[in-house]
Image (cartoon, grey):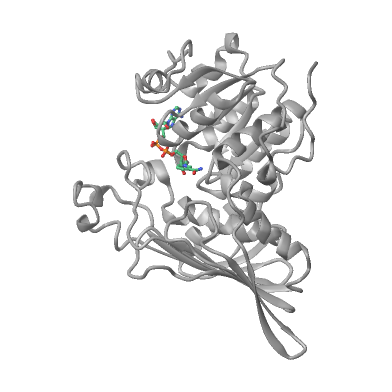
Amino acid sequence: MAEKMDKNLDYANQKQEVRIDTSRKLRIGFIGCGWIAGSHINSYKKMQDVEIVAGCDLIPGKAAAFFERNGVEGVKTDYASHKEMLDDESLHLDAVSVCTYNRQHAIPTIYALQKGVNVLLEKPFTVTLDEAVEVMRAEKESGKVLSIGFQPRLDANMQMIKKIVDSGELGKVYYIQTGGGRRRGIPTPFGTSFIADETAGLGALADIGCYSLDMVLNAVGYPKPLTVTGYKSDFFGKDPASYPNHPEYAKAFSVDDFAAAFIRLEGGIILDFRIAWAMNIDTPGDTIILGTKAGLRIPSTDCWNGTVGGPMKIYKTIGGVNMTTEVPIIPSDGNLFDKKIRSFLDACKNGTPAPVPSSQIIYNQAILDGIARSARLGREIKIQIPKI
Ligand SMILES: NC(=O)c1ccc[n+]([C@@H]2O[C@H](COP(=O)([O-])OP(=O)(O)OC[C@H]3O[C@@H](n4cnc5c(N)ncnc54)[C@H](O)[C@@H]3O)[C@@H](O)[C@H]2O)c1
């Protein structure tokens, strides 16, 4: 007999005994078969209620090679575009993973939603705010599930940040400093798709900046951004010395490798943000959340990998005495990518809300877009989000 999933599953604390309804298999397609598609397929393969039925990539033969390499047989891949695949009604697709580079996030997602297919879209949401608004309009029209691929949300330590804020121990939060990055780490694993404007659209700002923003905005309830003063630079990206094996990449580099911003959020919160793929320092600082009753320090990591960099600390003054409480790291209880895929599948099956909803991530995208626009204009700008 079919088991109904608990609608309020806490995925970060999910234990392996959760039972899956295998009587109904979801038919899954892939749009984009590059690097991150590899993590999606690894997780889908572990799910007993999934059948991978189709995949496409703009590069001829790439999808077929991808499924062969991953040992999945019987997948249809003879499509020249995502449109051809989504038009193939014989597939009866329930959901697609959109694993394309940033500039190709919006177009296939909108088309899939228009075709009545649920979408798990990789982060960042899109490149521009206008694209994100168009995607949300298609989502609203379709009534389908759209979830954005922020797997760090499902880490128990990340969830602890939100629990601390929600507990009220910090008092009223008025200032947040966040960001991070790498001393050297411009991503060019399989070519230039992360560093060329025509494929990536934005650099470090969106690639890892979206995670830092999500960590703190989710913790404080995703307040609406009001204004932003942004800065971007590309000193390392344009330097051939950054690519000892591929100096020609310096010419292809046409996004940012560093960004900083000062953002005003609704509710009187100031957000101070900086992010880097490359810089002459080990870290631009820990994340800190300052409240009227206590402050929280979240140690940075040397590379954005979806974890908290060490035990967090809460600073509080009680009876005139300054106290510091350490929050121990919660050990991992499973693969975050598996949880990302499982939580998306459960939302599709049970008709429950998307685990990482566009209604929140639109504010993340508005900030990224605002930083890029403000940096171009050289002044503070107001953030205006069109009606969806
Ligand atoms: N969640 C994570 O931890 C994580 C990690 C890495 C990358 N990502 C995100 O995943 C996305 C893809 O990154 P990647 O490293 O796999 O890039 P990639 O360049 O390795 O792969 C992207 C693939 O998409 C294909 N493609 C582009 N547009 C297409 C379309 N319309 N139809 C079919 N195929 C299309 C390209 O030909 C390419 O093969 C990026 O947006 C990136 O930010 C997320």
Left or right: where 349 falls relative to 257: right
Residue 19 lies in what quarter of the image?
Answer: top right
Residue 343 lies in what quarter of the image?
Answer: top right
Left or right: where 183 falls relative to 291: left
Above or below, 12 relative to 364: above
Figure quadrant of the N terminus: top right
Q: Residue at x 33, y 51 (%)?
A: 254
Q: Is residue 230 visible?
A: no
* Residue 360: image location, x then y, percent: 68, 50
Q: Residue at x 58, y 41 (%)?
A: 334
Above or below, 71 relative to 192: above
Count of residue discs: 0
* Residue 171 or residue 32, whichever sits in front: 171
* Residue 362: image location, x then y, percent: 63, 49
Ligand 1 shows up in the quarter that is top left
Q: Residue at x 32, y 69 (%)?
A: 280
* Residue 49 or residue 139, whichever sits in front: 49
Figure quadrant of the C terminus: top right
Above or below, 268 relative to 133: below
Residue 181 lies in what quarter of the image?
Answer: bottom left
Above or below, 44 relative to 182: above
Left or right: where 172 falls relative to 181: right
Q: Residue at x 35, y 48 (%)?
A: 187
Left or right: where 237 falls relative to 296: left
* Residue 248: image location, x then y, percent: 20, 47
* Residue 340: image location, x then y, percent: 60, 38
